[in-house]
Amino acid sequence: MTRLDAQIRYATVAASAETQAVHTPAGDAANVIEARDLSVFYGSFCAVRSVTLPVRRNKITALIGPSGCGKSTLLRSFNRMNDRVPGSRVEGSVLFHGQNLYAPNVNVVDVRRRIGMVFQKPNPFPKSIYENVAFGPRINGWRGSKSQMDELVEAALRRAALWDEVKDKLKQPGTALSGGQQQRLCIARAIAVQPEVILMDEPCSALDPIATLKIEDLMQVLKQDYTIVIVTHNMQQAARVSDYTAMMMMRPDRAGEMIEMDETGIIFSRPRDKRTQDYVSGRFG
Amino acid sequence: MSTLNIPMKRQRARSAGDILIRAVLFAAANISVFTTIGIVLALATDTLSFFAEVPLWRYLTETQWTPLFANQKFGVWPLVTATFLTSLIAMLVAIPFGLLIAIYLSEFASPRVRAVLKPLIEILAGVPTVVYGFFALIVVTPFLKQFIPQLSAFNSLSAGLVMGVMIIPLVASLSEDALSAVPDALREGAFGLGATRFEVATRVVAPAALSGIAAAIVLALSRAVGETMIVAIAAGQNPQLTLNPTVPVMTMTSYIVQVSLGDTPYGSLSYKTIFAVGTTLFALTFVMNILSFRFVRRFREVYE
């Protein structure tokens, strides 16, 4: 999508993520993202090994597996965040509505605008709460009025279930909020640019159980409008929130293999692979 | 402490060494404090005896500075404006170039390029200022004269420009440190929203490093205000109240050099003027440092 399209979308005012852009999908129409035989290397180290993984629209897909198995790398390859790592390299493809994100003509800035990200540690900018949310639209060519921006900020904060807590202190720094509030602010910041997909890299690992629960509830609401991929170390969390679960595994000599993917209920009750069974039942990892 | 079951002898030995080290460190820390106090006292005595003869209002209201002439005038403003003018020109060069270099090094350069470039830029800071002064006088001024025919042989323009070049490494190096200290998580957050490298650098990283950058700028300004050799050589020895950068002027530092090197009799009123000017210079930089300290504290972002 071009900057101009983005402007037009913004001009039609906030929070209309329902207006999904029309595309001509090459593969399964239900798949927003599809990794095909994807391998990611850091130098000569292979962090993700020939993974093929569909991400279905308006579903939550969880990536689970022991530390170092390549979950985060896989997630970060979906919006080309790994490009920032010197020496990283990709083989295979990641299809986004059938288009390979790693094709030479793809604009990485557009990719990241349409595939947003929430990080492990809340990372609000050292700006006001309002400016944190307004930042994304501003850099993406927002041309609306001040009151339209107010509406957009409010809509994003409402969707992130944060509005009631911060509506009286929008001018205060985002960094002054509690950890859970900061993370919801980061979610609001991500949805303010109206992405189609939200990637979440262990979004609750720095939060207490109550804040975690709030984020999980929020995800259930958000998936009506967005497609979500979440990396988590928390088995209960994966079981609670996700529709599909992909299990990744590492061995001493090789990391980054995806050993199975299925509906979450199946992965947690009767997985095909013995290693998945052991992992989800807490026998190792 | 005695509730801990540790042999007393060993504990005493340790605390004796502890006290000694503390004392040495405390003394070291105090050297700079006492030096500052000593400088203030040395300045103060002669400054006070100067103002006993020349009232402060004359110092602050007269517009001419001619303490070495028969008709003595003691208006400090020609010296202050000259210092202000050369410093302003220097900062107009040093801040934009210094910041651009810092942003390039911190946000755009590959690690390999940075490893080569940063030391190279810092070498610029090692060039003696007398060389810069000489360079301003015999290279920059003749060069500028081609475009500005009325430019005097001594002028604040080329002195200020060259002083700015001298200060670039200071601004660049300190600002680069401040930018590099901004956590990468903030960059990732911005990239994740579809920000370009330039937007990340200018709208997230630079604002987050604002206090460090401000500190760098104030330090650079103090350096410019206190810089002596370049202005003494290239800006002239002619105290006049002007903001025209093409004519010779005399900064506070140049004046102190002139009197210190000249045959002004020790203890005379003319001699005491340099203490008054020195105190003024000291007060200016002191106020600047306090303001910057407040500013830095006000805008500091604390990262884990």
Image (cartoon, rainbow, N blue to C red):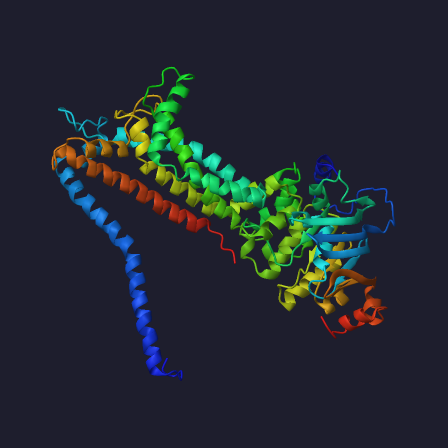
Q: Residue A92: x and y, percent?
A: 80, 49
Q: Quadrant of the N terminus of chain A?
A: top right
Image vertical order of residue B247 relative to residue B96, above or below: above
**Where, by quadrant of the figure, is residue B143 drawn?**
top left
Residue beneath the point at 73% across and 73% down = A284
Q: Quadrant of the C terminus of chain A?
A: bottom right
Residue beneath the point at 70% across and 67% down = A234
Which residue occupies the foreground of this view, A22 or A106? A106
Q: Residue furthest top?
A: B149
Residue beneath the point at 15% across and 38% down = B50
**Where, by quadrant of the figure, is residue B223 drawn?**
top left
Q: Residue B195: x and y, percent?
A: 64, 43
Left or right of A214 on screen, residue B144:
left
Say whether residue B245 is visible: no
Image vertical order of residue A237 relative to residue A99, above or below: below
Image vertical order of residue A183 relative to residue A97, above or below: below
Image vertical order of residue A244 relative to residue B112, above or below: below
Which residue occupies the foreground of this view, A138 or A280? A280
